[in-house]
Image (spheres, rainbow, N blue to C red):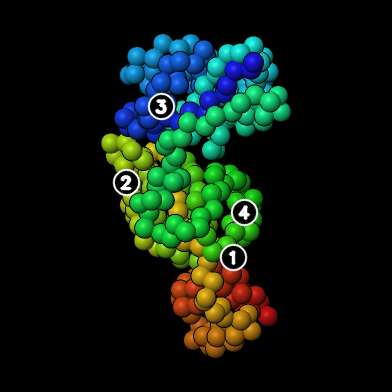
Amino acid sequence: MPGTLYIVATPMGNLEDISFRAVRVLNEADLIAAEDTRHSRKLLNHYNISTPMIACHEHNEAQRSAGLISRLNKGETVALISDAGTPLISDPGYKLVRMAGEEGIRVVPVPGCNAAVAGLSAAGLPTDSFLFLGFPPKKQGRQCAALEAVKPNTATLVFYESPKRIKALIKRAEDILGNRSACLARELTKRHEEFIRGSLSRILAELETREQVKGECVLFIQGADPGEAAVSPEDLRTVILDRLKENPGTGALAKELASAFNLPKKQVYDTILSLKAD
């Protein structure tokens, strides 16, 4: 009989955030497939787990999976872990799990930590419906297109992002989605865990005061309001034309009207430029 592939969630930071079942499975497995064996060694040593490890990450998963499937077909038990949290959730493992399913190998999840769910529970935003979007595209054009695509969605939006790019993501989200309520969760379960709650502009202003943003970030943005009556494009142009008689600054007027009508600042700004050009 084929063995079993266990998908084991591991701590995000605090080593106590692991289940008794996960520790048992890692102890009893024939092999642990880890995203980074050096990183996972700290967890295994903490719980006196001596199970052999093999690296299985985004750069070698396609090649490594065939060997792991072969061992599973021989009856061995393999536990898949990532550096932190639940494997496959913006982490490697999809190819291996898919191949195991195609081979008829039993795949068993061992649930536990997940940054998106843990952060959402404390974010102070609606939790009845949320849309997990993982890491957004790095290039500006593709990222803006991705934000435009989810703009009408009423679910709470959940993004993962690196500390180096988080400010750019927040600024683009404000420009495209509007100055919505949001929450930035940083360093979840670690010593310097932090939640910054408020509007997107308020969160960005807080980050701008810091010399450097550290730690992996999870950004939660409130979804679109389904009951809110949006101003029509014709009415918006009428208001802009009326205000332009006062010769205000383009940026200041865009910010004011975006806030007044709960519209993305970029949309208002582009409309003002268009009317000025005419």
Instruction: Give me the C-alpha separation between circle 2 and circle 4.
Output: 27 Å
Disc number placed over residue 194 in the picture, else none: 2
Disc number placed over residue 152 in the picture, else none: 1
Please provide percent x and percent y for residue 75: 61, 13
N-terminal of the pair, mark 3 or mark 4, is: 3
Q: Amino acid at mark 1?
A: Pro
Instruction: Give me the C-alpha separation between circle 2 and circle 1.
Output: 29 Å
N-terminal of the pair, mark 2 or mark 1, is: 1
N-terminal of the pair, mark 4 or mark 1, is: 4
Q: Which residue was labeled with disc 3?
A: 21
Instruction: Kindly state the secondary structure of the residue where label 4 is placed.
Output: helix
Instruction: Give me the C-alpha separation between circle 4 and circle 1.
Output: 12 Å
Q: Which residue was labeled with disc 4?
A: 146
Q: Residue at x 54, y 53 (%)?
A: 131
Which one is in front, 250 or 223? Answer: 223
Instruction: Kindly state the secondary structure of the residue where label 2 is placed.
Output: strand
Instruction: Kindly state the secondary structure of the residue where label 1 is placed.
Output: loop
Q: Quadrant of the N terminus?
A: top right
Kindly tell me whether residue 137 is visible in this rendering: yes
N-terminal of the pair, mark 2 or mark 4, is: 4
Q: Amino acid at mark 4?
A: Ala
Q: Amino acid at mark 3?
A: Arg
Please provide percent x and percent y for residue 126: 43, 60
